[in-house]
Image (tube, helix red, strand yellow):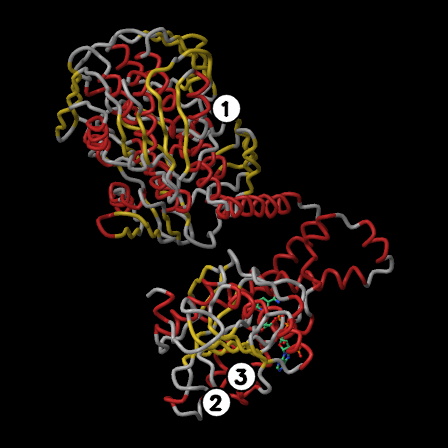
Amino acid sequence: MSDSSLFVGKKGVGSENSITDTVAVIGLGLIGGSFAKALKENDGARRIVGFDRNPNELQAGLSLGVIDEAADSLVSAVKNADVVVLAVPVRAVEAVLDEIKTEFKPGAVLTDVGSVKGSFVKAVERVFSDVELSARPAVIPGHPIAGSEKSGVSAANSSLFVNHKVILTPLPQMGCEALKLVSALWVRCGATVLEMGVDHHDDVLAATSHLPHLIAFSLVDTLAGEGDSKEIFKYAAGGFRDFTRIASSDPVMWSDIFLSNSASTLKVLDHFADDLAILREAIATQDSKTLLGVFTRAKAARDHFSKILSGQAYTTIMNSKNVIFKLKPGGDVNGVIRVAGDKSMSHRSIMLGSLADGVTEVEGFLEGEDSLATLQAFRDMGVVIEGPDEGRVKIYGVGVNGLKQPPGPLYLGNSGTAMRLFAGLLAGQAFDTELTGDESLSKRPMERVAAPLREMGAVIETAEHGRPPMKIKGNCRLKGMHYDMPMASAQVKSCLLLAGLYADGETSVTEPAPTRDHTERMLNGFGYPVNRAGDTASLIGGGSLTATKIDVPADISSAAFFLVAASITPGANLTLKHVGMNPTRVGVINILRAMGGDIEVSNESVVGGEPVADLTVRYSQLKGINIPEDQVPLAIDEFPVLFIAAVCAEGKTVLTGAEELRVKESDRIQVMADGLKAVGVDTQVTPDGIEINGSEIAGGVVDSHGDHRIAMAFAVASLRSKGEITINDCANVATSFPNFEALAKQVGMQISVEHE
Ligand code: NAP
């Protein structure tokens, strides 16, 4: 319903555009005065009538232009009003209501601005209990989340609510017309309106507003009572001033609020007092680990919170922003670069470091959204983690059995790897957990890990069609087992091996084709023996991990975009430093070489059990091939960009045995085929692969379906495109390759990024 349809036309001071006829504001203080003034300036009502028990304030409201009319009594203010707004202290509400309860005109709406909603609703119930239903107003409790330490009508400010939230807590039996009317009035004042339940409102506000005010009042009072308080206040710097600003708020109003919202405030106050006692004890006993734990968790939470507020966190808020890549055709690929740290190893370094005894130091950690979500999940399970700071992370391991129950579900962003590995690791814990992820992760299959874990004795629930969230029961005794994997999946293998740490006896997994072995290598690196016999990896549960140092190599999956970029760009000569060369990951190099790619390997070494090398790539005319099926698992994440290599090759490239690509972050076969069509390239899609003939790329607009690797693959395609390529939905590039844009520009690609 539009604002104007609520107009109840009658003669008044406002205009045809007014939302309603008469609004009566009772209590012309800061909030009541500001609301009246904002409604008046924005044509919210044709007539604003004010009432205040203090005649001077009422007169001031009239002369300051806050109201149109001053009522001479409470009753006369209410009598002809369509909307009555109570803006008096929360503990004064009941007495005011008692005076006016029989004076409302038929169809009137009663609302308020009080900071506590439970007490307002109780007062309304008590007062109106003896008033006939038909004579009662429709009641819409409200609370603007805006204000200041000032009070009185002289502080009234018509822009106080602009870009602020107003919470309405409508009761189930109230009509939706009344709710729309009150919402429309607040929106006219520039506010955003939210709805929530009464109890929820009081709990949330107790934690976010009432407790901070209590602490500020208490701290200032404590310091003012110290012998040398003058000295303290003289030297108190900006932080103290900022932190205690709210201690200048109105004492009467705040004592009212605490007494009216005592249950919710006491709950959060007791929790805070317990935590404060832990900090006290830690200081008294020189326990730096506890202090660091609290401070790093708080810093991470505050930083994350700031990101949420600026809309760039690893939550769905981030994904709701459309990030667009725009690429001009052509460009160069030259120079020396080091791409982001390996994502698989970054995840595993946090997981195993957390389960180890001692302090693990990690360098080259990928500060992508997904690895940060993994890091936060372990913080939520009580692990103290410092950083990341320029790729450096310090993990204070808690031992295999030292994790604690997290306070809520663990959010794992966009990462299928993380969710499947966590499932194994959490199946044997002593507490229940729930794993959730973003929209794309919530569509991915989890039964492939849940089913074998159940065979080991785990109790796991998945949502419809075996999708996240996954609910994992604690205190289940796991027993080791042998599992023949039906598909080649490093994630399933790693999941079962991690569950095996908690199982009785041996857990062994046989794979139908070689898959990544980072988990086995890193477990060995942490001193936990993993056996390899042919295509079977096994370990015995009940052991322990010892902290170590990890230098995460550059991610070959990220390097792959530049390997292809240089291979397809005439004149290209690019060196990629310190790339992870794990034999289970080098499929992209093998395939490009089989297509005639010119890739030179130098400076080979082994770092923390993982081989690394520098790679130099030069342009060469590629030719189409039948991709050997044994290379598919070794290059599973690299196919989007390998498809671009195939388009730039002479002849036909055929991929088979790659049905796994259909259940990645997107259906990578179909989404790539659709994207290629959009830039003028026809392909032949098959159930387990694709056929691509070498052809020209015309350019066009591509939808990446939120899949980071699809987005980056089409960015690479621009190097050989005739026209511009625009790629939509690229926000998730931050999950695996946070500085892709900068490196692409550095080597000579013509990329620009727009945020919508
Ligand atoms: P204020 O500036 O002190 O205004 C309070 C108004 O209520 C004054 O007009 C006052 O009259 C009147 N009043 C006080 N006691 C009364 C009583 N016993 N009977 C009738 N009227 C009485 O306070 P405010 O900041 O506007 O706060 C008003 C409401 O807004 C409170 O419920 C508060 O919880 C809520 N609120 C405040 C803020 C904030 O930051 N200030 C933010 C959100 C919500 P006099 O002129 O005689 O003093």
Between tags 2 and 1, which lies in front? 2
Out of 211 and 500, give the one closest to the viewer. Answer: 211
Which residue position holds label 1? 551
Confirm whether residue 506 shows in the render: no
Give the quadrant of the N terminus.
bottom left
Dot placed on the residue nearer the N-terminal end, 2 or 3: 3
Q: Amino acid under label 1?
A: Asp
Q: Position of residue 208 (x, y in %)?
A: 56, 60
Dot placed on the residue nearer the N-terminal end, 2 or 1: 2
Q: Position of residue 517 (x, y in %)?
A: 35, 26
Which residue position holds label 2? 103
Q: Position of residue 304 (x, y in %)?
A: 51, 45
Q: Is residue 556 left or right of residue 356?
A: left
- Residue at 35 percent across and 78 percent down: it is 173
Q: From mark 2 to mark 3, how far is it between C-alphas?
A: 10 Å
Question: Against 636, is 628 above or below?
Answer: above
Out of 724 and 705, give the one closest to the viewer. Answer: 724
| Crowd band around label 3 with a 10 angstrom C-alpha radius: few (<14), some (14–19), many (20+) | many
Secondary structure of the residue carrying numbered label 1: strand
Q: Is residue 594 left or right of residue 261?
A: left
Secondary structure of the residue carrying numbered label 3: helix
**Which quarter of the frame holds ligand 1?**
bottom right
| Crowd band around label 2 with a 10 angstrom C-alpha radius: few (<14), some (14–19), many (20+) | some
Which residue position holds label 3? 77
| Crowd band around label 1 with a 10 angstrom C-alpha radius: few (<14), some (14–19), many (20+) | some
Dot placed on the residue nearer the N-terminal end, 1 or 3: 3
